[in-house]
Image: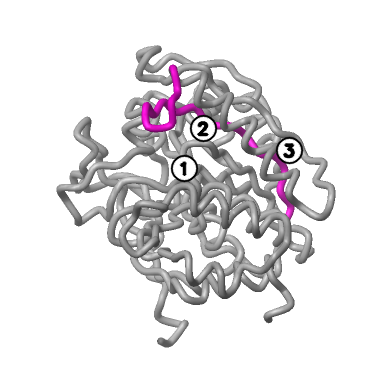
Amino acid sequence: MNKNHNQKQMLPATPTRDKLYFNGLPAIEHHEILKNIEIPDPKSKKRIIMDTDTYNEIDDQFALIHLLLAERAREDISVEAITAAPFHNTARNTDNYQHGMELSYQEISNVINTLDFKWNGPIKKGSSMSLDETKGALVESDAAELICKIAKSHKKDEPPVYILALGALTNIASAILKDPSIREHVVVCTLGGSAFNLHGFTDFNYEQDMTAAQFVFSSGVPVVHFPGYSVTDHLRTSRWELEAHIGNSKSAQFLYNRFMEFVADYPGRSKPIWDLAPGAWVLDPSCFITEVCETPELTNKNTWIEQNGTHPIRTIRWINRDNIFKNFFSLINPQQS
């Protein structure tokens, strides 16, 4: 495929749409949104925050190790912080959102302890409640505080701070409510929902805190959307592929064991590793076909309604599954490269 044609761009803003108003928040310039959702420049330094419900499944662990190994291998990647997102999932024996967040906070440390190098970045606890529970009110947390601090340290001539949102959007929504000005400094790379033109699918991440998700999508913060169903579910791997390629490092064996714990009863022993996608986009956007369009409405039923005259959003239409896994395996098992 011709790489010159794999990224569709929106036309520049017209004078009547230069400033957009969202959710009662201060105005944000249309061109600022478009600038922050541009394709990542491989030559520029990328500052990244990962917000993750790590304990909920097994794909966050893959995504976290992928990103930290890339930071060690590349000068253009800087992981500024890892924050624990809240979740409540009876299948994972959580009592409430705070319990899920606490388990994720511990799992982040479990992942980092498998690395063969020391990572000294900050790990912060996120919200103890969902915005559904607070009826949209800000939930203070160390995560929201740090997201605001890092965003405010961004300089205008730098690429935006990339927030890789791999779970519920509670921490990100709370950070925006705490300081709406951070919208000009970040881009939220959120994984969840389905493709905008696909209906009939539900999603765990957004349903965990629909109020937070609806707020983020309507707030005007620049967003790159990674649909779960029909796009990132192509990031499927299997027991046999992992055995052939993942290697024998402590991190590799940790991921393999977590994978086998989860898929022991799955037909084919295979499963999507959805959460690899946002980090893979920042590391190598050539693996993706994207489109900039107008932000649709996210309904209470976790479906999309097309809207006209809204702010721009970049959405992922297709991914090169094989190249993404090739890049991942080359980092975790460099001997086979």
- Mark 2 and mark 1 lie on one chain; the one further toward the N terminus is 1
Q: How is the image coloured?
A: one colour
Closer to us: mark 2 or mark 3?
2
- The quadrant of the picture occupied by the N terminus is bottom left
Dot 1 and dot 3 residues touching (CB under 8 Å): no
Q: Is residue 313 magenta?
A: no
Residue 54 x/y as whole percent: 54, 39
Determine the CA span between mark 1 and mark 3.
32 Å
What range of the chain is rendered magenta? 77-95
Closer to us: mark 2 or mark 1?
1
Q: List the residue tagged with mark 1.
A: 57
- Mark 2 and mark 3 lie on one chain; the one further toward the N terminus is 3
Residue 223 x/y as whole percent: 45, 47
**264 relative to 20, above or below:** below
Q: Give whichever of 36, 245 is nearer the camera.
A: 245
Amino acid type indicated by mark 3 = Ser
Dot 2 and dot 3 residues touching (CB under 8 Å): no
Q: List the residue tagged with mark 2.
A: 172
**240 relative to 231, above or below:** below
Number of numbered discs visible in the structure rendering: 3
Determine the CA span between mark 2 and mark 3.
17 Å
Residue 308 x/y as whole percent: 22, 48
Residue 119 x/y as whole percent: 80, 46
Q: Give whichever of 153, 133 is nearer the camera.
A: 133
Q: List the residue tagged with mark 3.
A: 153
